[in-house]
Every structure is written in structure tokens, then in C-alpha cells.
């Protein structure tokens, strides 16, 4: 790694702790319901209007049903908006209704905090759909994830002995998280983005004259407007040129802020954070990386406060950081090393004062290797999915890092809320393994981990790998799945594996090259996103309920400490072990084969 | 065509609701007894 890469990494980690610490204190207050009186005065009329009693806690089952109903209604609303956008206002570009299968995929995608996009935003979605459908779900899906983390933290923190297993009130949690955490943070970040040049308007798209004539090739159509093909079935191309370009406009900054803070990742434009209207400067690039990790970091501190032992939060954060730094140490050098096949052709891939060097295919020259590779690691470590470079063009080793980070279960900082509850599930597994080693009943934070909790933990951990691997097998077995693969061989397999990994783990980023906007992939990926999200949330809430119903045991000489370096190593090892056992065979067929072919 | 995709959302919701019901049964005293019996090798 270059000195500047180390410098950027250190700046990022230090800034996260500095910003995350006070935010964690504030989030802990939200979780405990200890709000300032003026906030309570503001929210009380709304709760009264909705018939919600803020003081009433829910059984985990009620909490789960409320969460599922809320998200299903959200999915239907986003679906309806897309289908009706042609007749609704705020559509200056005259966008037609989105196709039914794409609407279904996008609705599920944004509700599950995945933000997988099979469409190009600027040529598909009206401003109303972007704002009222997608941006609103950016807030609500993020709030849902944090609410589940709150419920689990309360399960660990509960000291009551009534055995009822109350985990909080979903409606109160989702309201407070949205109103008092996500909205204020997003407002500040959106204003900062506007100051840096991110656009925020309702203008019609602008047609401008380019500096020079652009010559290009386009498919030739017959009299019926259908693409012409030659005898071999290859599309016939024709030369064309233009002196104009259409610039897409829209309310971008307001969507961009929550896209990062909520680890959603769905771009206003198809190019996502590689687009200069979404991510115009090096400063916005740094701010976006910070924004992705900010709430997941703060949640670790908040967790420590809620359970009454800050060291527990530090331990979880340390485990996340170790895994993240390890990934960065692989991905940046892999991209900086460049492509060995270009070396004999005389291509200069050395870093110098005039160029970033390395593998610059698919990367913005204004960001270079370090800021692109670091962004890729951050966006896939967290379940964000925003991209400022095309992951499909990374070297095989560099491209494998984002896949592995997702396959670890999105627990390396992870999504807002989902990263924390995912890592806590691994912590339960880690203390269980440790308990087996030393022959004691495992305990975590004073709660006995018994057969019931371990069954739920197993379901929570295994559901995503099942979805990812079964989905990948299905896609590469069926004609409809193979039809979408643009690159043959190992790289094509990597593209399919990446798509299912991204969907099942609710990341949303894509290896380009896979034509996924087809009924087959829209349906398959939507199911993967839904089951990957809620199939994990339900057992996590069940664990929260089970833990909340248990007495909290006092710390004794026989209690295994879960705040020291030993536990951090155990936790990191558990995450790695589960991830590698699940996915190594699939990785061997894709990026590993590609890497060996490149360096043979 | 829309009805098919709306029904798909409903099916996904029902699948997760069934999971809630199933895991809640597992958490009940009866469910825990069964779990314990199964893990200890005893006949339920």
C-alpha cells in the first residue's frame, strides 16, 4: 500500500471514532427512550393520532408482525408509484410506467435496504418516484434495521425477571430513528453535498452542445424499429455522430445523503457515485465513505452503553475494524499492481506524479486507485452498495474482496442496524464455541445461551448462504439465467455469484456485465433480497425475545470475558470460519480461477 | 399482470409471517420441551 493509502485509511478510521462516539451516546438515548422533553412534546401528538402508546413494549412476535406489515405495505406503495408514475406529477422527462417485473424487483430492493438496481435511474424513474418511493424507503428501511438492533440490544440489557420477553415498540422505534436520527443527519449532509456541487432541482433534463463532435456506433434498426442482425446473429452496427448531450437533472442531494447514511446505496443516476452530479469532489468522496460507516460505528458505541458496558461495544467495533483493515490491505495493492497481461504490451501501470498507475479500467481518474478501491471495500463491508468505480473491472483478486466482504454476512460494520445485529449473532456463536471448548454453559453479557438460542442463531446465520448458493446454482443451471451472462467462463460465474451475494446479503452493488433486468433475474433476486433480509430479522427478533425473558447473571470468576483481545480474535475467527466454509467452493469457481488464469 | 406481482409480495409476506409463527411455537414451553427432547436423543 502507498503512503497516501495508509494516510487515507487512518484519517477515515480516526474520523469515524471521533464522530461515532458522540453519535453513539445520542443513539443510546434514543434506544432507551430518554429523549429531551421538547422532542417528546413534538412526537406525542403524532403518536396519539396513530393510536400508539410510546410506553407500551411489545412481545418479539408482535414486534416482528408490525415490522413485516410495515415493510410489505412499503413494497406495495413503491410498486404502485412506479406503475403509475406516467400519470403522476413531477415527471418532466415524461417517464413511462416501469415494467411490472422491474417494479416488483425495485420495490423489494428498496424495502429491504438492498437498493439493487436493474434499471438506470435517469432513464426510468420520475422525480416523484425517486423522492416519494425510493428516498422514503431509504429512510424507512434504514430505520427498520436500526430498530431490530435496538430490540436485540434491549434483549441483552433486560434485567427484568417477568419472563415475558418484551423488546420495545416497533412503531415508536421506527418513528424516533427516522425523525430524530436519520432526518437531521441527512439534512446536514445534503446541504454539504449541495455546497460541493451535487445538484438539487426539479428542472427538466437539459440538452447542451458538446465541445466537439462525438462519433460512435449504434445498433441499426429495420423499418419496424427492431435491431438488425447478420447471418451469424450479431447485431448490425452503423456509424453515428452527435454534437449534443442530454444532462439529467433532479433532486439528487437529498437522496444522496440518506443513500450513504442509511447504507442504502441506490443511486439517482445509473453511474451511482461515479457520476459527478452525485459525487463531484474528493471531499464528497471522503464524506460519502465516512457517511457509510458512521451509523454502524456509532451503533457499536450505543450498544455498549445500552448493555451498561462500553467495552463490549469497543470489542465488537474492534472485530469489525480488524476484518475491514485486512480487506483493505488486499484490495488496494491488488488494484495498484495492475493487470499483468498489459505489461508485455508496454502499458505503463506504474504510479507517478502524472497518473495513478495500476488497474484504472472502470475507475474515475479523479479518484484514482486508492479512493476507488477503499470505496469498494467500504461499500461492500457495509451493506451500502453505492459504487464510485465499476467492480466488474477490478482485478480478480480485487473483485473477490467485495464478494468476500458481503459473504461474511455484511457484519464488517455492515448495514445500519443489520451490521450490529449480524455481528452479535456471530458473538453468540463465538461464545457457544468457546463454551464447548472449556465445558461451560455459554454466556454472553450475563445471558445464558442455550439450545433454543443456538437453533435460532443457526437459522439466522445459515439462511443467507442458502439463498445465495441455491440462487446461484439455479441461475447458472437454467437457460433464463445463463442468457443474462455477458462474459463466458469464470468471470461470467463471478457475475452471477456477485449478483446473488449482493441480493441475499442486502448490499445492492453489482458486477456489471450481467443483464439482470429480465423477468427471471428480477424475480429471483427479489426473492433473495426478501428472504435474506427478513429471514434473518425474524430469528434475530426471536433471539431478542428469548434473551429479554432471561435473568441477567452476575459476572463471576468463571465468566468468559467478552471485551478483551482474546474474544475479538475468537469473534473474527468465527466470522471468517463460517464465511469461508460456506463460500470457498463457489469462490474457487469464479474469482480464484480468474486470478490463476491472469497470473499463470 | 400487476396482480401477479402484487400477489408475489403477499406470498413473500406470508412466508415470513409463517416463520414468525413457527419460531414463536419453538419458543413456547412445549416447543422448548420438544427441542430439549430432540437434542438429548429422547423420544418426544
Image (tube, coloured by chain):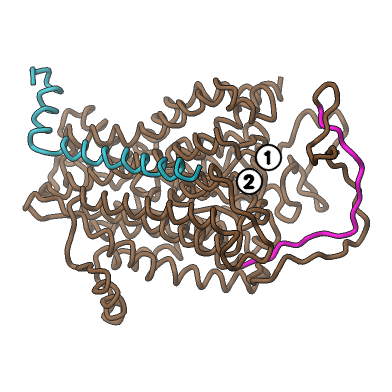
A164 vs A99, nearest the viewer: A99
- Chain identity for the colour brown used in the image: A
**Looking at the figure, which quarter contains the N terminus of chain A?**
top right
- x, y percent for residue A583: 47, 27
* Main secondary structure of the magenta stretch: strand
Which mark is first along the chain, 2 or 1?
Answer: 1
* Residues indicated by labels 1 and 2 sit on the same polypeptide chain: yes
Secondary element type, mark 1: helix
Is A596 within the magenta? Answer: no
Residue at left offset 63%, top offset 72%: A194
Would you name the residue on which mark 2 appears? A373
Is residue A280 at all visible to an observer of this figure?
A: no
- x, y percent for residue A236: 86, 33
> Badge 1: few (under 14), some or many (20 or more) residues near its Cα, within 10 Å?
many
Would you name the residue on which mark 1 appears? A335
> Badge 2: few (under 14), some or many (20 or more) residues near its Cα, within 10 Å?
many
A416 vs A245, nearest the viewer: A245
| Residue A177 shown left or right of residue A215 in the figure | left
> Compared with residue A361, is residue A51 higher up or lower down, i.e. above or below?
below
Is A236 within the magenta? Answer: yes
* Chain name for mark 2: A
Boundaries of the magenta span: A234-250
Whether pointer 1 and pointer 2 mark residues with C-beta atoms closer than 8 Å, the reply is: yes
> Compared with residue A346, is residue A27 higher up or lower down, i.e. above or below?
below
- Chain identity for the colour cyan used in the image: B
* Chain name for mark 1: A
| Residue A344 shown left or right of residue A98 in the figure | right
Amino acid at each position: 500500500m502507498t503512503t497516501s493509502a495508509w494516510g487515507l485509511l487512518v484519517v477515515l478510521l480516526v474520523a469515524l471514532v471521533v464522530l461515532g462516539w458522540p453519535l453513539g451516546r445520542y443513539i443510546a438515548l434514543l434506544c432507551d427512550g430518554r429523549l429531551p422533553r421538547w422532542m417528546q412534546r413534538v412526537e406525542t401528538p403524532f403518536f396519539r393520532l396513530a393510536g400508539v402508546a410510546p410506553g407500551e413494549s411489545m412481545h418479539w412476535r408482535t414486534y416482528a408482525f408490525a415490522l413485516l406489515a410495515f415493510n410489505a405495505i412499503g413494497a406495495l406503495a413503491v410498486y404502485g408509484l412506479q406503475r403509475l408514475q406516467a400519470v403522476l406529477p413531477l415527471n418532466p422527462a415524461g417517464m413511462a410506467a416501469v415494467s411490472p417485473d422491474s417494479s416488483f424487483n425495485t420495490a423489494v430492493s428498496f424495502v429491504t435496504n438492498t437498493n439493487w438496481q436493474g434499471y438506470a435511474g435517469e432513464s426510468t424513474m420520475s422525480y416523484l418516484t425517486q423522492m416519494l418511493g425510493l428516498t422514503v424507503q431509504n429512510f424507512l428501511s434504514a430505520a427498520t434495521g436500526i430498530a431490530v438492533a435496538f430490540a436485540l440490544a434491549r434483549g441483552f440489557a433486560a434485567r427484568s425477571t417477568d419472563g415475558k420477553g418484551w423488546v420495545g415498540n416497533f412503531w415508536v422505534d421506527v418513528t424516533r430513528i427516522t425523525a430524530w436520527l436519520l432526518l437531521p443527519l441527512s439534512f446536514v449532509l445534503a446541504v454539504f453535498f449541495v455546497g460541493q456541487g451535487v445538484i438539487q432541482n426539479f428542472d427538466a433534463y437539459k440538452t447542451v452542445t458538446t465541445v466537439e463532435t462525438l462519433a460512435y456506433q449504434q445498433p441499426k434498426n429495420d423499418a419496424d424499429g427492431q435491431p438488425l442482425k447478420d447471418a451469424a446473429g450479431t447485431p448490425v452496427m452503423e456509424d453515428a455522430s452527435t454534437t449534443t448531450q442530454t444532462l439529467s437533472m433532479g433532486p439528487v442531494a437529498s437522496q444522496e445523503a440518506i443513500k450513504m447514511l442509511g447504507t442504502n446505496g441506490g443511486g439517482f443516476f445509473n453511474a451511482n457515485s461515479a457520476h459527478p452530479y452525485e459525487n463531484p469532489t474528493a471531499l464528497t468522496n471522503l464524506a460519502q465513505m465516512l457517511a457509510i460507516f458512521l451509523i454502524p460505528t456509532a451503533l457499536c458505541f450505543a450498544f455498549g452503553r445500552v448493555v451498561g458496558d462500553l467495552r463490549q461495544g469497543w470489542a465488537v467495533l474492534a472485530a469489525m475494524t480488524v476484518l475491514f483493515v485486512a480487506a483493505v490491505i488486499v484490495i488496494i495493492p491488488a488494484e495498484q499492481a495492475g493487470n499483468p497481461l498489459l505489461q508485455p504490451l508496454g502499458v505503463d501501470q506504474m504510479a507517478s506524479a502524472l497518473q495513478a498507475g495500476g488497474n484504472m479500467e472502470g475507475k474515475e481518474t479523479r479518484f484514482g486507485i486508492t479512493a476507488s478501491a477503499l470505496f469498494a471495500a467500504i461499500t461492500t463491508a457495509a451493506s451500502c452498495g453505492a459504487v464510485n468505480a465499476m467492480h466488474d473491472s477490478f482485478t480478480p483478486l480485487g473483485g473477490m474482496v467485495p464478494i468476500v466482504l458481503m459473504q461474511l454476512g455484511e457484519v464488517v460494520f455492515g448495514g445500519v442496524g443489520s451490521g450490529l445485529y449480524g455481528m452479535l449473532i456471530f458473538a453468540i456463536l463465538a461464545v457457544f464455541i468457546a463454551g464447548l471448548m472449556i465445558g461451560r454453559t455459554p454466556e454472553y453479557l450475563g445471558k445464558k445461551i442455550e439450545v433454543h438460542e443456538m437453533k435460532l442463531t443457526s437459522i439466522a446465520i445459515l439462511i443467507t448462504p442458502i439463498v445465495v448458493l441455491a440462487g446461484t446454482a439455479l441461475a447458472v443451471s437454467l437457460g433464463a439465467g445463463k442468457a443474462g451472462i455477458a462474459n463466458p467462463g469464470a468471470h461470467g460465474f463471478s457475475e452471477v455469484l456477485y449478483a446473488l451475494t449482493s441480493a441475499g446479503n442486502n448490499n445492492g452493488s453489482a458486477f456489471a456485465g450481467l443483464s439482470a433486468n429480465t423477468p427471471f433475474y428480477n424475480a429471483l433476486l427479489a426473492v433473495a433480497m426478501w428472504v435474506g433480509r427478513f429471514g434473518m430479522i425474524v430469528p434475530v427478533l426471536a433471539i431478542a425475545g428469548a434473551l429479554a425473558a432471561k435473568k441477567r447473571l452476575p459476572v463471576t470468576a468463571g465468566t468468559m470475558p467478552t471485551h478483551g483481545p482474546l474474544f475479538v480474535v475468537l469473534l473474527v475467527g468465527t466470522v471468517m470460519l463460517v464465511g469461508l466454509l460456506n463460500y470457498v467452493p463457489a469462490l474457487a469457481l469464479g474469482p480464484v480461477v480468474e486470478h490463476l488464469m491472469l497470473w499463470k | 399482470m400487476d396482480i401477479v406481482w402484487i400477489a408475489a409480495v403477499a406470498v413473500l409476506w406470508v412466508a415470513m409471517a409463517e416463520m414468525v409463527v413457527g419460531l414463536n411455537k419453538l419458543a413456547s414451553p412445549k416447543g422448548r420441551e420438544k427441542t430439549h427432547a430432540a437434542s438429548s436423543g429422547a423420544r418426544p
